[in-house]
Amino acid sequence: MARTKEKTPKKPKEDGRIKQMWQVFQMTRRYDKNIVPLLLLSVLGPVAVGLVVALVLGDGNGFAIALWIIAGLLAGVLIALVVLGRRAESAAYGQIEGQPGAVGAVLRSSLKRTWRGSEMPVAVNAKTQDAVYRAVGRGGVVLIGEGPKSRTTRMLDDERRKILRVLPNVPVTLLFVGPDADSIALQKIPRKLARIKQTLTKPEVLAVDNRLTSLGAANLPIPKGVDPLKVRPQRGR
């Protein structure tokens, strides 16, 4: 019998760059009403400047005038892409701001390589959904409280004491993300971490992170009534 050739499933084609940019623009436009006039200004402004320069310096040379206009257009497109990227980032942060887990999403996707963070909090208040997140980098350990400062201050102090108990020589910085006037915005978390004075080497960052991770794993809650020393593996029937 002849073997039928099995057709390997084709990989779904990734969206092209232009389509991706269009999707980003559509998403941004839903949350940012000023994006269209800003993009138009970004493109037309450099084109107008290029045209003026061409008329002043072109000496009536059509080729030179065309080059200046094209240069202005290219500069305008580049500026428009930068504006779109920043406005899209602000729109994305605006969608998750104020929601539980927003800080974790930033730590997962926006930190530089010199920092190690997790989207999972190290402490959570089940009633209020306030949480504490941790990041480790060249600047030491940073604890970020998500929620009103009046409720997260005590949680941050408790976590800081735990860290200083095992790592007394590592600096610990406290940050607040919430509705208070002196709290920082979500999009400013990576920038804030980058400005902290570097005191640890890369190997020390790895050692500190591993130490804190192991402590967190060791402190996982065990269900009541279960003695971990008496648990036996179940036998197959």
Image (tube, rainbow, N blue to C red):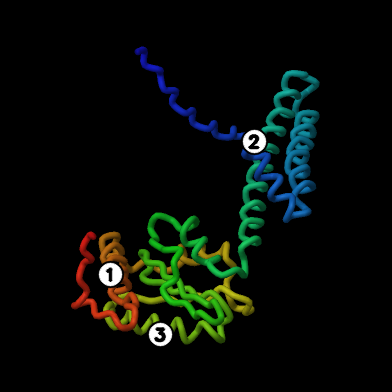
Secondary structure type for disc 3: helix
User: Which amino acid lies under the numbered mark 2 shown in the image of this protein?
Assistant: Lys
Disc 2 and disc 1: Cα gap in Å?
44 Å
Residue depicted at x 51% and y 61%:
105
Residue position for label 2: 19
For label 3, the crowd category at 10 Å Cα-Cα, with few meaning under 14, some 14 to 19 and many 20 or more, is few
Q: Kindly check if marks 1 and 3 are in contact, taking CB atoms under 8 A apart as contact.
A: no
Question: Image check: 87 left or right of 119?
Answer: right
Secondary structure type for disc 2: helix
Residue position for label 3: 158
Disc 1 and disc 3: Cα gap in Å?
18 Å
Residue 84 in the image: x percent, y percent?
Answer: 67, 47
86 and 30: which one is in front?
Answer: 30
181 and 154: which one is in front?
Answer: 154
**Earlier residue among tags 1 and 3:** 3
Which quadrant would residue 15 be assigned to in this image? top right
Which quadrant would residue 62 be assigned to in this image? top right
178 and 233: which one is in front?
Answer: 233
Q: Kindly check if marks 2 and 3 are in contact, taking CB atoms under 8 A apart as contact.
A: no
Residue position for label 1: 214
